[in-house]
Amino acid sequence: MVIFNFIEKKMTDKKTIHEWEDELGFWVLDPDGFDRTDKDLFKRKFTKEEFLNNCAISTLEDVGKYFEVLKESKIKPECSCKKSDSWRCAKEQNSRDLACSCGCHKINI
C-alpha cells in the first residue's frame, strides 16, 4: 500500500515548466505546444505527462534528451489524428523534426 501511494503521488506531481526542465534535463526554447496566451504559463503547474505532451509540439533545446525521458517514463505524446501512438525522428538522427509513425503529423521540435 505504501508503494502504491508513492507511485500514485509521482504520477500526479505537478511542477512548473522551469521545474520540469531542471528535473528532466532539457529546455523548452519556444513553448508553442503550450497555451502561450496564458499570462500565468510559467507559474502554472503541469503533471509530467501534461508537460511531455505539450513538449511534443514545442521547440526544444535537446531532442535526444526528450526522447530518453519519453522512453524511460513510458509516456507517448498523442498524434492529433489519434491513429498513431508512436513517434520517431522524421529525418536524420539529429533532426529537430518529430513525426508520428502514421505519417500524418510532423512537428518541428
Image: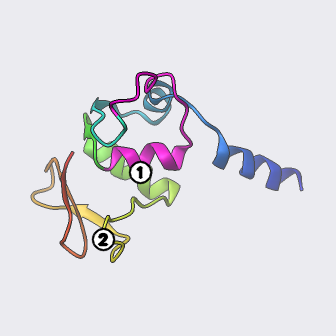
Residue at image point 46% right, 26% down: 22
Write down the quadrant of residue 12 in the picture.
top right
Q: Which residues are magenta?
A: 36-56
Location of mark 2 (residue)? 81
Which label is found at residue 53? 1
Q: Quadrant of the N terminus?
A: bottom right
Q: Is residue 103 left or right of residue 21?
A: left
Which of marks 1 and 2 precedes in the sequence? 1
Indicate the secondary structure of the residue bearing disc 1.
helix
How crowded pointer 2 is (Cα within 10 Å; few <14, some 14-19, many 20+) is rated as few
Q: Nearer the viewer, residue 65 or 76?
A: 76
* Prevalent SS, magenta region: loop
Q: State yes or no: discs 2 and 1 in contact (Cβ < 8 Å).
A: no
Q: Nearer the viewer, residue 35 or 51?
A: 35
Q: Residue 29: horizontal and vertical position, in percent?
A: 25, 29
Q: Is residue 93 left or right of residue 10?
A: left
